[in-house]
Image (cartoon, rainbow, N blue to C red):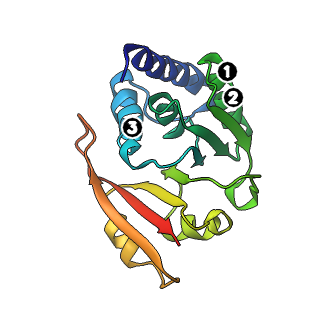
């Protein structure tokens, strides 16, 4: 990652901490925690992002969408959240950081009807895997991938899924530097 990208990541962290005082965007308030548990955690799934259009479902403070948009400037990101105050922050962050590859949409995922399909759907701390698959059913097109960021419950959530057609589901461990917690990315490819 370039020094400019690293500086933009840190500017996002600063905006998050500033706005967090007013909007309660995250329980993680110390700078080192924000870097590890938000920025590095979000960037850990970058190797699995495919295609030119990505939807970040339940973006909240911009995770994982904003760090990924910084790391992958050639990819278009749509940050989706249903809460007005979060959307206000996301729009401010996108404008302040000068993103040309980020759009912000205020909507619930089950109600969101985009004009174009997404190549990759990402979510972090959003819902159970079963609920994510249910809420995104209208976005699941052939070739679309879902990257659900999960903790140690990932294998159990996959095993608990009811049988639904033919899906390619993989659970990969993810190593986040300086984080002493179990992380996984659940990858779902839709046929």
Using the image as rendered, state which of residue 66 and residue 51 is in the foreground: 51
How dense is the environment of label 2, judged by Cα within 10 Å: few (below 14), some, or many (20 and up)?
some
For residue 7, side relative to residue 22 (left or right) = left
Label 3: state its secondary structure: helix
In the displayed structure, 23 sits above or below 176; it is above
Q: Is residue 7 left or right of residue 99?
A: left
The residue nearer to you, when weighing 184 against 170, is: 170
Residue drawn at 55 percent across, 61 percent down: 144
Question: Where on the picture, by quarter, is residue 42?
Answer: top left
Q: CA distance from mark 3 to mark 2?
A: 20 Å
**Mark linked to residue 95:** 1
Name which quarter of the figure residue 159 lies in: bottom left
Residue at figure coordinates x 39%, y 61% from the top left: 186
Residue that label 2 marks: 91
Q: Are marks 1 and 3 in contact (CB under 8 Å)?
A: no
Using the image, tell me which numbered label, if any, was put on residue 108: none
For the point 45% across and 78% down, the residue is 161
Q: Position of residue 128 (x, y in %)?
A: 49, 65
Q: Residues within 10 Å of mark 1 (few under 14, many from 20)?
A: few
Q: Secondary structure at mark 2?
A: helix
- Residue wearing tag 3: 43
């Amino acid at each position: 990652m370039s020094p400019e990208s690293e500086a933009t990541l840190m500017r996002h962290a600063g905006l998050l901490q500033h706005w967090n005082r007013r909007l309660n965007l995250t329980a993680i308030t110390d700078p080192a925690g924000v870097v590890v548990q938000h920025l590095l955690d979000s960037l850990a799934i970058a190797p699995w992002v495919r295609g030119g259009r990505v939807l970040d479902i339940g973006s909240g403070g911009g995770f994982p969408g904003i760090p990924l948009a910084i790391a992958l400037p050639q990819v278009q990101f749509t940050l989706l959240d249903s809460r007005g105050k979060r959307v206000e922050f996301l729009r401010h962050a996108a404008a302040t950081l000068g993103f040309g590859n980020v759009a912000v949409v205020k909507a619930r995922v089950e109600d969101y009807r985009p004009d174009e399909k997404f190549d990759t759907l990402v979510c972090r701390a959003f819902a159970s895997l079963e609920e994510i698959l249910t809420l995104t059913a209208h976005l699941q097109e052939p070739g679309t991938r879902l990257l659900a960021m999960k903790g140690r419950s990932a294998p159990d959530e996959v095993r608990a899924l009811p049988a639904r057609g033919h899906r390619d589901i993989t659970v990969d461990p993810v190593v986040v530097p300086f984080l002493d917690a179990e992380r996984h990315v659940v990858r779902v490819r839709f046929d």
